[in-house]
Image (cartoon, grey):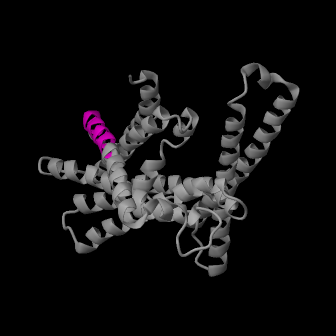
């Protein structure tokens, strides 16, 4: 029997995020159409899961895929990270991003015959499909109890961040009056970028399981997610005809290297501040509410929260400094 509460936890966070982007985009398509793409995204998630299962079955019968996933036969690694990287690139990234792309292209081509679609509309369709895919994935994780509700809420925007590059490229191509081959090639390059980012995020998220020095890769997980969220926001501005937010503006190589270093430093600080708060919640979640008021635990919560807040504020200060410097340069 389906647990209705789990179904709500799986669907409501992606729907709320879809509503947030719907309210942000002027001249957005009707909400009914976005919900239709959301449902198509759920179906694409089911299709991707089925194709992954078929791929695993067929590949294992020919090349021993389960052994390859554990470790590449030609390597002498002590961990399974190379096998997981191969699986993420060849199987998960290709299938999932391919299913989402098809889920956007097919209904969009049908609607295009009847309506003149804006670039922002196609970008919103992409977000809707990605969030529908997320809802299906949430349900799988929650039903099998392989992730907590908090973990899935934190991961709600991730599939939208994966698909943003090819959604942007698809919007340029479909909304253009003159469709050029370079725009079509741009779609493939953007989709390939999404596949690589998808695989890399999954690899970084699993790196904490391994011994040193591979364990340190996990500290790149949240900074990379933060950068992808920044990229999503930049692309959303572009499809609305707004100028992108400039952080690196100086023409001299030395100054540009300095500004790039500051951006990277802010991503590391901000991403790992979020990571620290995420770990704090995971540590405290098994405790009963009464134990949270013990003096030792309260001091632990207070100290960890202040430490991560300090890093987050420092990252925000670097971001505001770069934005202010760019504004002062252009105005």
x%, y% of residue 316?
A: 67, 51
> For residue 235, which quarter of the picture?
bottom left
Which residue, as the protein is rendered here, is positioned at the far right? 295
Q: Residue at the location (23% across, 59% down)?
A: 174
Which residue, as the protein is rendered here, is positioned at the far left? 113
User: Is residue 269 rendered to the left or right of residue 168?
Assistant: right
Relative to residue 198, is residue 131 depicted above or below?
above
x%, y% of residue 251?
A: 58, 77
> For residue 18, which quarter of the picture?
top left
Pick the quarter of the image with the C terminus: bottom right
Q: Residue at the location (20% across, 51% down)?
A: 106
Q: Residue at the location (72% across, 32% down)?
A: 284
Between 331 and 311, the one lying in front of the other is 311
Pick the quarter of the image with the N terminus: top left
Residue numbers of the magenta segment:
30-44
Tell whether position 265 is magenta: no
x%, y% of residue 2?
A: 39, 24
User: Is residue 88 rendered to the left or right of residue 293?
Assistant: left
Between 296 and 231, the one lying in front of the other is 296
Main secondary structure type of the part rendered in magenta: helix
């Amino acid at each position: 029997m389906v647990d209705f509460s789990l179904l709500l936890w799986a669907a409501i966070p992606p729907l709320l995020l879809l509503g947030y982007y719907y309210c942000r985009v002027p001249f957005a398509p009707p909400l009914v159409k976005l919900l239709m793409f959301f449902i198509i995204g759920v179906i694409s998630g089911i299709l991707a899961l089925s194709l992954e299962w078929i791929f695993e079955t067929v590949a294992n019968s020919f090349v021993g895929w389960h052994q390859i996933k554990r470790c590449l036969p030609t390597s002498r690694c002590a961990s399974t990270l190379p096998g997981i990287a191969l699986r993420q690139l060849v199987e998960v990234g290709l299938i999932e991003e391919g299913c989402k792309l098809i889920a956007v292209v097919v209904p969009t081509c049908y609607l295009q015959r009847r309506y003149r679609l804006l670039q922002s509309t196609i970008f919103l369709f992409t977000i809707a499909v990605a969030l529908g895919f997320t809802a299906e994935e949430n349900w799988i994780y929650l039903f099998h109890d392989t992730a907590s509700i908090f973990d899935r809420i934190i991961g709600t925007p991730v599939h939208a961040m994966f698909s943003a590059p090819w959604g942007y490229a698809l919007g340029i191509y479909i909304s253009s009056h003159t469709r050029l081959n370079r725009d079509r090639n741009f779609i493939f390059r953007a989709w390939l970028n999404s596949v690589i980012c998808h695989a890399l995020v999954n690899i970084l998220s699993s790196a904490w399981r391994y011994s040193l020095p591979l364990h340190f890769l996990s500290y790149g997980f949240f900074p990379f997610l933060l950068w992808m969220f920044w990229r999503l926001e930049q692309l959303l501005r572009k499809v609305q005809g707004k100028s992108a937010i400039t952080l690196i503006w100086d023409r001299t190589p030395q100054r540009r290297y300095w500004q790039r270093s500051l951006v990277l430093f802010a991503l590391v600080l901000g991403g790992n501040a979020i990571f620290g708060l995420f770990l704090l919640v995971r540590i405290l979640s098994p405790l009963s509410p009464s134990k949270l008021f013990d003096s030792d635990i309260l001091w632990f919560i207070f100290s960890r929260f202040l430490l991560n807040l300090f890093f987050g504020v420092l990252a925000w200060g670097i971001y505001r400094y770069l934005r202010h410097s760019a504004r002062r340069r252009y105005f």
